[in-house]
Amino acid sequence: MPKVVAVLGPEAALGFALTGVEVIRVADPAAARDVLLEAVENREHGLLIVEEALLDGLDAASREALLARNVPLLIPVRLSLRWASEGKAAEDDYVARLIRHAVGYQLNIQL
């Protein structure tokens, strides 16, 4: 059965470790690049969760190559989210980008 692996900075790694997911802690985007390139070649991995800030720190070619893969599926997770009062949240396309990446095209959702 494919494994779920999370590649995260030190702070986020503590929370994800509580879920039972295998966590690989990295200090910076350079370390994340090396870990991610190794992780995508591991045939046991089916899903890679990566802290979005680490992924954004990679060069464009590396980032696009990682996101273009289907197996393992790479899911960037934004960890800088904050609670906001109802109706006061900033407009954001984070969920739309996740759906577009998973489905392969843009969905327009009316709420």
Image (cartoon, rainbow, N blue to C red):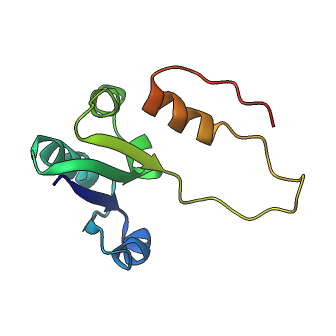
Q: Residue furthest top?
A: 105
Closest to the observer: 30 or 83? 83
Question: Picture coordinates of residue 83 (x, y %)?
Answer: 74, 65
Give the total of numbered labels: 0
Q: Is residue 40 visible?
A: yes
Q: Is residue 51 above or below residue 104?
A: below
Image point 66% across, 36% down: which residue?
93
Q: Is residue 57 visible?
A: no
Image point 79% across, 31% down: which residue?
110
Q: Is residue 67 above or below residue 95?
A: above
Residue 10's image quarter? bottom left
Image point 18% across, 52% down: which residue?
2
Question: Picture coordinates of residue 90 (x, y %)?
Answer: 79, 46
Image point 27% across, 31% down: which residue?
70
Q: Quadrant of the N terminus?
A: bottom left
Question: Picture coordinates of residue 16 (x, y %)?
Answer: 39, 71
